[in-house]
Amino acid sequence: MPDPSFVFAQSLSGLTAAMFLFLIASGLSLIFGVLRVLNFAHGTFYMLGAYAAYQFVQWLGVGGGKFWLAALCAAMAIAALGGIVERLLFRHLYGKEELYQLLFTYALVLILSDGAKMIWGTQQKSVSRPPGLTGSSMLFGATIPHYNLFILLLGPAIALTVWFVLQRTRAGRFIRAAALDRETLGALGVNVNALYTWVFVIASFLGGLGGALISPMRATTPGMDTEIIVEAFVVVVIGGLGSFWGTFLGALIYGQVLSFGILFFPRFSIFAVFALMAGVLIIRPWGLLGRPLK
Amino acid sequence: MLEVRDIRKSFDGFLAVGGVSVKLDRGRIAAIIGPNGAGKTTFFNLVTGHLKPDAGRVLLDGRDITGLAPHDVCRLGMGRSFQRTNIFPKLTVHENVQAAFLSHRGRGRDLWSRVERLYREETEGLLASLGLLEHASETSGFLSHGAQKQLELGIALASEPSLLLLDEPTAGMSATETRETIRLVERIARERGLTLLFTEHDMEVVFSIAQRITVLHQGLVIAEGTPAEVRADPQVRRVYLGERQ
Amino acid sequence: MGLLARVPWGLVILAAAFFVPAVGSRFYVFLANDIVIWALFATSLNLLVGVTGLVSFGHAAYFGIGAYTTGLLMKKLAVPFLLAFPAAGLLAGGFALFFGFFCVRLTRIYFAMLTLAFAQIVWAICFKWNEVTGGEQGMPEIPYPDFDRIAALPLLGGWRTAEYFYFLTLIAVAVCLWLLRRIVGSPFGRMLTTIRENAERAEFIGVNVRRYELAAFVLAGAFAGLAGGLFGIFNRGVFPDFAYWTKSSEVLIMTLLGGMGTFYGPALGALVLILLNQQITSYTEYWPFVLGVILVVLLFVFPGGLAGAAQAAARRLGGARRA
């Protein structure tokens, strides 16, 4: 019987991982819900967010709240990148077959991740934790870094903010309407094209923010994009493609399955995750909280 | 030949078809009419197996086919044309019809023969009777609307059905095209001894060839009988007031 | 133009391919061997994507299964190639039957996601099952088939092992492509295209769409497995990344690059992509970047791929033959 404080630590680490996954997956889910496209490049936006955070930290330093500024700037830079990509390139593929749209997002992965290599090289980059959150505490016998705890609070806070925007603001209503029936929305005179661009921008912001926030916790390396995108796919499938809280739930489940999977079935934890994804698709394709596609 | 007993279907609480019964004898021509949203296409989908009914039975020649998949229903001798033109756009006209022959004659499991020369005579014969032979090697997606609808009919006929369901066969056609199509349909039905069930908006068409008419309104049958009976029915007149062509 | 179309180009290219070891260096044989195997892999995927209209993100799973099957049989159980090779196709086809059964019940994006999930499961098993698959390290040193008896025959002596293997690959792939060509040009193949064009209509000419899609899935998986079996030997080792999703995307890109609308398009895509890769990596390490740009250009300008563009050009010159 494993030691309870160890279980607690694992659970907490699973929750922390879930928060990051949620940030990325929510952007993925948003893009899918409205644009009906699975954006392979989303993991790359996450990676670029981490690199951008590193870069801003290099320029601004880390002390006195600068890290948070750097993270925000990084997220906004990625948001801008997403908007540009959508506006200039992706928009022209809307009428075409889904396969072409998917392959375009994959082409973005190739271009952007190599672009990152060109700018930052292949060596690992690290970002130090912001002062004030560098310590750790003993909780239930386990050592928990303060930064992780902060993320555990920040994650749901961001989730609630995004949810609030989607539910209560006009823009949010349009986004939800577009997810349900974009033709009617267009017929009602809403500028659907601009809406799509904004969706891309917001989703890229979330992805980039996830990358920026994770940079003090994990090394920033090339290849983190292809790793994370598959994880994001699993989360979105479990929770339900296009469902916001589904993504949150999916991320939580994934985080726990992975961290406890490693604990009890160390060799098959990755297998378990994909088996879960396959299982959901077989039994209930639209996920736990999703709605069947039209 | 076709008997539908009390068929029912709801979507999320909305009753699309509620307790409709239809009887059709072999060799007859019948029509289902009704205003938009009356449930005609849903009814067709229930009969052909595209939808599973919530209640009721569909019998083809006495055999219960309720809930069978469309491909099985087709193999039992029911053909269908669709309201929105449903063809194989990137295939040529010839290939469209040939595909139906291939499937119907059980060649689908053949992984070896070369497909080009199979059923050439049958396909060309059918195309000729529809007046489409000259377009045989054209890509079907580029055909005019009227020609596509005729091709649609051709595909349905190539499955050599004994019962043919036509969903708005003259939708979107000009008056001339409509007359030609209906004449064609009637001739083919007579030549092949087909039983025909169709839905239509064009009342002239309906009254000119249908032997029995069922009128649907909001998912329910409000009248049924010969064209004369239906025309005189007061409920039908009320429903159609303002809907006259 | 008609005369040109009557030349059996397939046979001509095959014959030409046999001469590569005679005129080219070791490196060219290596490259040609790579191209030929990927040509089979890509053509097998096209049976799903181009012919039936089913986009699979997990085709590499069957490639990997084929590779591990042949590798395991030949390396650990000393099974001769003539048995180990078909076994790759059989096992891959078997897995395709099992996975495909679930996949074809879904549509579009869910179908694609499930194919991806199954492929990642295969990858995860290969990655972690150290005892059988060698785990992360894979299985290096897969033996070549035994060519001694062939080398002893009168006119066939004097080549290096790698070259014998190249000839073997050529023959195997040529036979497989010929079989695939028959399948695509058969009534069965025509039924598949009706599914791609309009699945609803196909149902109503009596096509049991799910069953045909499953059949296509199994055939595609089996041929991918055969390609994998060859590749494991060629690559001198079998590794888990053979089944990873990026491998699936590589082969998908080849198929698109060459053109999904023609039979030989994917093979052409394999040729072009591998040659481009080889050329460009000699100038720069940023091959993915270049590939990404090429892909973008392709998607915007030549969605029919190279073969599609060539066909369109030929049509404009008058009288081209449809594949």
Image (cartoon, rainbow, N blue to C red):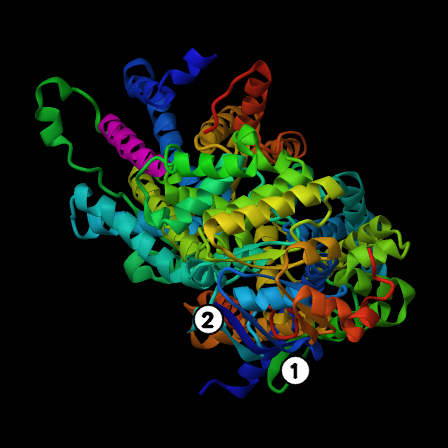
Question: What's the chain of the residue with tag 2?
Answer: B
Q: Picture coordinates of residue C141 (x, y %)?
A: 27, 43
Figure quadrant of residue A101: top right
Three-letter code, disc 1 = Met
Three-letter code, disc 2 = Ile
Within 10 angstroms of label 2, few (less than 14), some, or many (20 or more) residues?
some
Viewport quadrant of the C terminus of chain C: top left
Q: Is residue C160 magenta?
A: no
Q: How many marks?
A: 2
Same subunit: marks 2 and 1: no
Tell me the residue at 45%/14% (across/down): C2
Label 1: state its secondary structure: strand
Label 2: state its secondary structure: loop
Q: Could you say which disc has been placed on residue A138 in the image?
A: 1
Closer to us: B233 or B178: B233
Q: Is residue C313 left or right of residue A186?
A: left
Which residue is under mark 2? B65
Q: Picture coordinates of residue C281 (x, y %)?
A: 52, 28
Closer to us: C124 or B7: B7
Residue stretch rendered in magenta on the structure: C162-182
Q: Picture coordinates of residue B189 (x, y %)?
A: 53, 51
Closer to us: C51 or C234: C51
Figure quadrant of residue C223: top left
Q: Note whether C82 is above or below B227 in the view shown.
A: above
* Cα–Cα gap, marks 2 and 1: 69 Å
| Residue A121 visible | no
Q: Is residue C151 left or right of residue C53?
A: left
Question: What's the chain of the residue with tag 1?
Answer: A
Within 10 angstroms of label 1, few (less than 14), some, or many (20 or more) residues?
few
Q: Picture coordinates of residue C11 (x, y %)?
A: 32, 21
Q: Note whether B67 is above or below B242 in the view shown.
A: below
Q: Nearer the viewer, mark 2 or mark 1?
A: 2
